Image: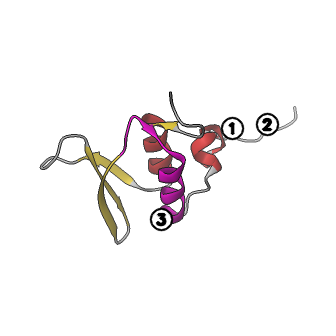
C-alpha cells in the first residue's frame, strides 16, 4: 500500500526539470542514484519509484518549487496553453 500524497518518480523528475533542475542518473556509484544540479546546489539522491510527501516537501523547499506542481503537473508554466484570441 502506498502512502497518501506520494507521487510517481517520472512526475517528480518532470517537475524538477521544468523548474531548471538538471536531473541525470549518476554514472559512478550506487545504481539508481540521481544527480540533481541547480545553480551552486549539487546533490546525489535516490528518488524512489513513489516519492513520499516528505521528499516532495524537501524538493519544494530546496529548489523553490510550488508543492502543488508535484501533485498537479498540468499547472507547470510551460504546460499552460497560450491564451486564445477572439476571432
On the image, the x and y values in percent for residue 33 come to 25, 46
Q: Which residue is mark 3?
A: 62
On the image, the x and y values in percent for residue 58 come to 49, 59
Q: Quadrant of residue 25?
A: top left
Report the front residue among 83 and 33: 33
On the image, the x and y values in percent for residue 63 come to 48, 62
| CB under 8 Å between discs 2 and 1 | yes
Region of the chain picked out in magenta, as a range: 47-63
Q: Which residue is mark 1?
A: 81
Residue name at image x 61 percent, y 53 percent:
67
SS for tag 2?
Answer: loop
Q: Earlier in the sequence, mark 3 or mark 2?
A: 3
Residue name at image x 49 percent, y 44 percent:
52
| CB under 8 Å between discs 3 and 1 | no
Task: Inspect the magenta stretch and tell me whether residue 69 lies in it.
Answer: no
Q: Which numbered dot is residue 35?
A: none
Report the front residue among 52 and 41: 52
Q: Sort mark 3 into few (<14), some (14-19) or many (20+) by Cα contacts within 10 Å.
A: few
Where 71 falls versus 45 (above or below)?
above
Q: Which residue is mark 2?
A: 84
Is the magenta region chiefly helix, strand or loop?
helix
Amino acid at each position: 500500500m502506498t502512502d497518501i500524497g506520494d507521487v510517481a518518480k517520472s512526475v517528480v523528475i518532470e517537475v524538477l526539470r521544468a523548474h531548471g533542475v538538471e536531473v541525470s542518473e549518476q554514472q559512478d556509484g550506487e545504481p539508481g542514484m540521481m544527480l540533481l544540479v541547480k545553480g551552486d546546489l549539487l546533490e546525489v539522491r535516490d528518488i524512489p519509484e513513489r516519492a513520499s510527501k516528505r521528499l516532495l516537501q524537501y524538493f519544494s523547499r530546496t529548489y523553490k518549487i510550488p508543492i502543488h506542481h508535484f501533485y498537479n503537473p498540468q499547472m507547470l508554466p510551460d504546460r499552460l496553453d497560450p491564451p486564445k484570441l477572439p476571432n
